[in-house]
Image: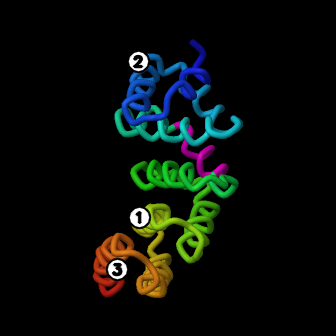
Amino acid sequence: MLLKELIVYEHSRAHTDFVAGIILQKPELFQELLNLMLTGESPIPWRAAWIIEKCSEQNPLLIKPYIPELIEALPNFKNDGIKRHITKILANSPLPSKKLGLLVNTCFDWLLSGEIPVAVKVHCMQILYNISQTEPDLKPELAAAIESQIIFNSAGFKSRGNKILHKLNNEIESL
C-alpha cells in the first residue's frame, strides 16, 4: 500500500500511531511523508502532520534535518491542525539559528492574533520563550505580548502564559 493511501485509509489515533510506527521502522519514508504534508490535498497534509508529530516524539533526530524547512513552510499553512502539530514539534525541538527571524515573526503574529486557536498560541509562546534563552532582547517583548493577551484567552493559555511570565520576569530582573 502506498503511503498516501495508508494515510487516508482511516482517521483515528490508533491508525496514526500505526503509520508512525511504520515510518519509524522505515525512516526512508519520512521525506515522502513530509512532502505529502507540504503538497498534498486535504485531508492528507493534516493527517501527515499528525504522523510527523508522533514520529518526532519517538525519534527527535528524524525531524532535526527538516526543521528549517518546517520553519519556512509554517507561515503558509492555513489548516489550524497543521499549525498546531508543527508548532508543537518546533516547541520541543532544538532550533537552528537559520530562519529564526521568520519563526519569531510568525509566532508573534499568531500569538497576538484573535483568530489563531489557543493550542497554537501556547506552542508559539513556548517557541518564543525557547528562543529568548539565546536571544535575551526578546524577553521584554514576549512578556508584554503575553500580558496583553492573557485576559482574552482560555484557562490553558493563562496557565502557560503565567508560567512563562514568571520565568521571564525572573530572567529580566537578572539582566
Please identify the dominant SS of the magenta region: helix
Res 38 → quadrant: top right
Quadrant location, the C terminus: bottom left
Q: Residue 64: x, y in percent?
A: 48, 39
Label 1 – label 2 distance at C-alpha: 30 Å
Indicate left or right for 102 with 148 as reference. Answer: right
Q: Which residue is mark 3?
A: 165
Find residue 106 and name its label. none
Quadrant location, the N terminus: top right
> What kind of residue is marked 2?
Gln
Q: Residue 158: x, y in percent?
A: 35, 77
The one nearer the camera, 163 or 150, is 150
Residue extent of the magenta highlight: 65-73
Residue found at x 46% / y 17%: 26
Label 2 – label 3 distance at C-alpha: 40 Å
Q: Which residue is mark 1?
A: 126
| Dot 1 alpha-carbon crowd within 10 angstroms: few under 14, some 14 to 19, many 20 or more | many
Could you tell me if the residues under marks 1 and 2 are in contact, i.e. CB atoms within 8 Å? Answer: no
| Dot 3 alpha-carbon crowd within 10 angstroms: few under 14, some 14 to 19, many 20 or more | many
Q: Which residue is mark 2?
A: 25
Which of marks 3 and 1 precedes in the sequence?
1
Q: Residue 37: x, y in percent?
A: 62, 37
> Disc 1 on helix, strand or loop?
helix
> Disc 2 on helix, strand or loop?
helix
41 over 131 or under it: above or below: above
148 over 27 or under it: above or below: below
Which of marks 3 and 2 precedes in the sequence?
2
> What kind of residue is marked 1?
Gln
Residue found at x 70% / y 54%: 76
| Dot 2 alpha-carbon crowd within 10 angstroms: few under 14, some 14 to 19, many 20 or more | few
The one nearer the camera, 42 or 134, is 42
